[in-house]
Amino acid sequence: MEYKQKPFLLSLVFYFLMLAISCCTLGFVRGVQLFVFYAPFPLILTCNLPKFVKNFVLLLTATISLIIISFCCIQGFLYEHYDASLKSTFVIEALANTNPTEAKDYLTTSLGSLLSWGLFFTVISSLIIFILFKLKEKHFSPPKIKRIFIFLFSLLFLFSFYQEAWRNKFPVFVYTSFYKSALNLKNAWANLEKENAEYLIRAKQNISNVLDEPRTIVLIIGESTSREDMSIYGYKRDTTPLLNRIEAEDSNFIKVNEAFSTRFSTVSAFNSMLKFNARDENQNVLAFLKAAGYHITWISNQDDSAIKGQYANFADDLVQLNRQRGRSSSSMDEDVLPELKKALATPYPKKLIVIHLIGLHPHFSLRYSPDTKATWPDNDTVQKQLIEKKRSKRTIVLKDQYDLGMLYQDRVLSEAFKISKAFDKSGPLTWVFLSDHGVETGNRGDFIGHSSKTIGGYSIPFFYWCSDQESKRDRAKFAQRPFRADWLSFLLLDQAKIPCKFPYSEKSWSNADYQWKEPSVIQKLKNAKETGS
């Protein structure tokens, strides 16, 4: 009797391990759905069968099990860091927008976490394989109750592959669908000429009047720049001394105290900032400025095919400074400054100059020049707080690198502001800086990087300056006026003086009719913090 109980117990251990890992990483319902793909085989392995049949069942069970375990580990990693499933838009966009160099750099950056999940996979897989080999050694005719379970589990297994909705839950089909989605998205990005032409047609149809007065807009978009690490926003390290000085000396320079992105990754953040819905149609704000006669210069220090296809292709002048894709790119943002001078000096009466910085894109150690030296002492208040919070050495090192990168950004942004301000005599000039999204920098956990789970992943800086005497702002009032990046399009339309056949003044931060509405993602994160969840 004991001999027959042992395989039964081993089968239970197999089921427990497989269900535990799948339910913990994917949720209970998904874990049960995956159960049917392996349910009959551990029981079949203990039956009195020819050796070649047993070997086949063992190989099949091991293969299915390892596929499921690896899938669970991948999903677990994505949920842990990004709260995203494999088939989410965020992950699909990331794959479609990457290349071997960037993939290699990402693997290097996330090596610690990947090794942890790899170790977990190795341990669980080894246990599963060990159990399967032990089950294979048993040879006896199954009792009636066991035959019933084998029959029922086999029916469920066959049904799961017959029924399409259920079959698509199996990891191999998920991977196939994921790859197709990423490939389709990449192809769509590569064939945007027709779509952009349609955006331009819609823009012309929606502009009610074109004004000929000269005007220049300088829009600088940072990368992974969090206001939480800027001393101009109260951070304890002096990371923005030059911007601090500009704010103190120029009463027209406005630093908005609360500004948020509504996305935590680059492509989706750009889509939210530069596309909008009006009259039940998708619109692209660059198409509106182009249709209104603006000469568009796009200066990029990022080699990003997705951004280039959707937005930079509207440019009359495209300046691509960075020829090295990936996180290992060491192209310095100061290289945009001479190009900004050239763009401002062009004789066009109406100009939009967009600068896309590499900003604080990981790796942080590559985001500042060798002459960038910390203005704060070792073992300062920030470092002491990190140690008190039991942050790892890696987090402390990355925090130091991030803040040095911020100090370098301070130099680039302050110089870009001075260059722009010097050209305001040629006509009204608006200067705007914001980041595509923020990052978590160890303030809410032992983690530095893109974050969908903390408000740091969405907290961005927003600076505004305008030379137009009619557009002078009450700085104290406007500093308290919150800004959301997905309404950037309406601010640009307002600053470009483009009247449209649809209302937008309530969403333009600079307009007297502005009505603030907090983004739902920010509301949820604030509520989660208040409730302690």
Image: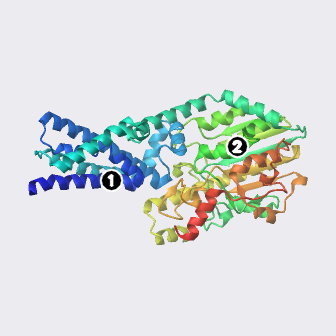
Give the numbered dot on residue 358.
none
Residue 154 picture location, percent across and down = 27, 41
Of 434 and 148, which appears nearest the observer? Answer: 148
Give the residue type at disc 2.
Answer: Leu
Q: Is residue 310 above or below residue 81?
A: above
The residue singled out by tag 1 in the image is 19
Q: Is residue 334 visible?
A: no
Write down the residue under mark 2.
274
Q: How many marks?
A: 2
The residue sitting at 85% across, 52% down in the picture is: 467
Mark 2 crowdedness (10 Å alpha carbons): few <14, some 14-19, many ≥20: many
Q: Secondary structure at mark 2?
A: helix
Position of 378 relative to 174 (above/below) = below
Q: Is residue 44 left or right of residue 160?
A: left
Left or right, residue 68 beside residue 241? left
Disc 1, SS: helix
Question: Label 1 crowding class (10 Å Cα cut-off): few <14, some 14-19, many 20+?
Answer: many
Counting from the top left corner in percent of width and height, residue 522 is at: 63, 59
Left or right: 63 in relation to 331: left
- Is residue 19 left or right of 425 when viewed as pictured? left
Amino acid carrying mark 1 in the image: Leu
Q: Is residue 141 visible?
A: yes
Task: Pick the residue in front: 489 or 42.
Answer: 42
Residue 140 horizontal/vertical position (percent): 10, 45
